[in-house]
Image (spheres, rainbow, N blue to C red):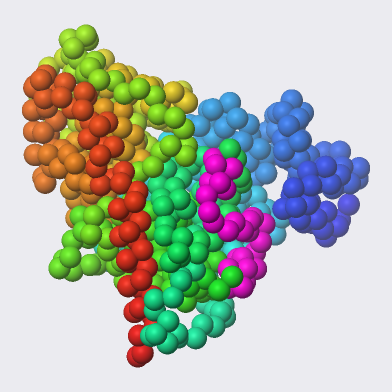
């Protein structure tokens, strides 16, 4: 088989892969091997197709065969890396993918079909970095792969994922803003939908509010969405929900509320925007930002005259078609110069979110007695994504452990579910002088809320604070110490605690963060009061007052609409 014919089969296989037709992909490999049984590219293609068809044994044998003759075959390296990942051998996966990336980047004349392999390898490498809590490496790889992609939608998706990862480590405000504004480049040729400025007299009419999200389902964001669908004033507002994610049992519960539902799964961003436009939405609220399955490409077509983003993402979207970013007086205090946002700030007087977990699950009984009473030592804990655990955070945690004799630290999360992840965590903490004998790593489990009964004091991360994890610790009776930072995302914890009625848990400096944790640990009566009363405090707080929250949101909607209607 000549090289031109072979390249044609390989490229056809890539198209079948994009369509998810792995059997047709395998057929292409067999066409190549019918001419030459020892063609390494054909064997590697067969191995990749076998892998996706869950034929693990044949895929493994093919990779071993290729290794002996063509150890630098990119596709074989990719298949070997995915096989390693399937066995949770993430360190090996990363080593193989880093080799693949280096080899591919060094080639000046990489064939089209191998460019797809390199792109897939880069995506897998970024995901592996993220899983092992290396957000800076993950973001850098996602930016790199985005820069290579030909498909504009895929380029934008990877760039958006990279932006999300940048929140896990410290960037200057100027650098973060520049990266987020770069997102606009993927929509430069778009034509936005037209909207006429309304007459001011229309400002008090019944408004049509649209909510767009991939997370009307079992997801962290869903814990904050119920008030928008249940507690709005039906006489003054009509609500439409645009569902972009896979439905589940939680979705069915959401559907009980008085709202019009639109399923936009599978639609292109343009078609989804047209669907929203046809509903004559006045204000479109995005709950995704740059989180997974972002809906921002839909907002780029401006399907509504007023567009607002918030809750699902803690930073600017950077997208010029998003008019407002939802915040509050704690995260972005009035009178303070706002930096790093392309949007105007839509500020609520109290909390920017309302914690309403009942739609997700029935809450277990809170632990009303601190575990230290029976253990004889204090247990600190963090159930946050370990990618949020910065070097600065580890220094604070070390100082706390040093000042609280015999205390323990529980770290719970997905990274502790993987042997290589556990090794990474222990190695990193050892480098900061944290004794492994005082650590307990717990894997993710569905009963994670019940496991808060084993925690005396939760320690928030910085500069990227916990959100849902902080709410969940409080509702389970566990006090959370959080450091107020200088950016919106670094004040998220402070906002939750202040609106939850426990502002005394907010630290204004690193020293105060350490001192608060140490002082609470040394005060058994205070700790007991927290555990006995925190749930009731939270239930009666602003953070869970959905009726008051929606009145403030509706006042905000009216203000934004009046501003839009006001003559220039």
Residue placed farthest to the bottom in the image?
Answer: 568
Res. 121 visible in picture:
no
Q: Position of residue 176 (x, y in %)?
A: 32, 62
Q: In the rendered image, which quarter is residue 309 located in?
A: bottom left
- Is 8 rendered above or below residue 76? below
Left or right: 110 in relation to 548 = right
Q: In the rendered image, which quarter is residue 403 located in?
A: top left
- Is 315 rendered above or below residue 91? below
Left or right: 482 in relation to 108 = left
Q: What residue do we see at 45% from left, 64% from top?
A: 235
Q: What residue do we see at 28% from left, 37% from top?
A: 539
Give the camera-side residue of 517 and 128: 517
Looking at the rendering, the stretch of residues picked out in magenta corresponds to 250-278
Left or right: 158 in relation to 488 = right
- Magenta run includes residue 264: yes
Q: Quadrant of the C terminus?
A: bottom left
Give the camera-side residue of 187 and 243: 243
Residue placed farthest to the right in the image?
Answer: 34
Q: Position of residue 35 (x, y in %)?
A: 91, 45
- Is 127 rendered above or below residue 157? above
Give the camera-side residue of 51 and 2: 51
- Is 272 rendered above or below residue 352? below
Res. 310 visible in picture:
yes
Q: Position of residue 237 (x, y in %)?
A: 45, 65
């Amino acid at each position: 088989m000549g090289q031109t014919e072979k390249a044609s089969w390989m490229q056809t296989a890539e198209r079948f892969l994009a369509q998810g037709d792995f059997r047709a992909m395998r057929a292409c490999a067999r066409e190549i091997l019918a001419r030459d049984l020892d063609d390494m590219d054909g064997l590697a293609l067969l191995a990749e197709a076998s892998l996706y068809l869950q034929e693990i044994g044949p895929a493994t044998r093919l990779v071993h065969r290729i290794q002996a003759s063509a150890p630098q075959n990119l596709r074989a390296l990719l298949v070997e890396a995915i096989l390693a990942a399937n066995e949770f051998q993430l360190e090996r996966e990363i080593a193989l993918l880093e080799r693949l990336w280096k080899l591919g980047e060094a080639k000046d004349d990489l064939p089209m079909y191998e460019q797809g392999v390199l792109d897939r390898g880069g995506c897998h490498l970024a995901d592996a970095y993220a899983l092992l809590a290396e957000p800076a490496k993950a973001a850098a790889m996602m930016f790199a792969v985005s820069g290579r992609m030909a498909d504009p939608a895929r380029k934008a998706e990877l760039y958006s994922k990279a932006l999300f990862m940048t929140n896990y480590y410290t960037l200057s405000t100027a650098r973060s803003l520049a990266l987020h504004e770069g997102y606009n480049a993927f929509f430069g040729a778009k034509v936005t939908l037209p909207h006429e400025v309304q007459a001011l007299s229309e400002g008090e009419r019944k408004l049509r509010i649209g909510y767009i999200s991939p997370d009307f389902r079992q997801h962290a964001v869903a814990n904050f969405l119920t008030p928008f669908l249940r507690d709005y004033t039906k006489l003054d507002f009509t609500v439409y929900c645009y569902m972009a994610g896979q439905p589940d049992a939680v979705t069915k519960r959401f559907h009980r509320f008085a709202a019009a539902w639109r399923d936009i799964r599978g639609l292109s961003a343009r078609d989804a925007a047209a669907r929203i436009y046809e509903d004559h939405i006045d204000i479109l609220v995005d709950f995704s930002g740059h989180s997974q399955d972002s809906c921002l490409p839909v907002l780029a077509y401006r399907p509504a005259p007023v567009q607002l983003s918030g809750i699902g993402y803690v930073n600017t979207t950077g997208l010029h078609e998003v008019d407002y970013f939802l915040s509050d007086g704690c995260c972005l205090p009035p009178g303070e110069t706002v930096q790093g946002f392309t949007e105007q700030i839509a500020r609520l007087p109290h909390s920017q979110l309302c914690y309403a977990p009942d739609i997700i699950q029935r809450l277990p009984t809170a632990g009303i007695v601190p575990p230290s009473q029976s253990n004889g030592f204090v247990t600190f804990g963090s159930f946050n994504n370990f990618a949020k655990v910065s070097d600065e955070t580890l220094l604070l945690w070390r100082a706390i452990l040093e000042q609280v004799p015999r205390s323990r630290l529980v770290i719970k999360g997905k990274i502790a579910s993987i042997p290589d992840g556990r090794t990474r965590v222990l190695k990193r903490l050892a480098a900061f002088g944290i004794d492994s004998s005082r650590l307990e790593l717990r894997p993710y489990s569905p009963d994670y809320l019940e496991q808060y009964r084993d925690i005396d004091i939760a320690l928030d991360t910085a500069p990227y604070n916990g959100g849902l994890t902080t709410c969940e610790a409080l509702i389970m009776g566990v006090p959370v110490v959080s450091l107020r930072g200088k950016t919106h995302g670094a004040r998220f914890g402070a906002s939750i605690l202040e609106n939850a009625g426990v502002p005394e848990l907010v630290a204004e400096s690193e020293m105060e963060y350490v001192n608060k944790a140490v002082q609470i640990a040394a005060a058994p009566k205070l700790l007991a009061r927290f555990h006995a009363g925190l749930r009731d405090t939270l239930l009666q707080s602003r953070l869970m007052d959905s009726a008051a929250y929606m009145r403030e949101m509706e006042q905000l909607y009216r203000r934004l609409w009046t501003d839009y209607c006001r003559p220039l």
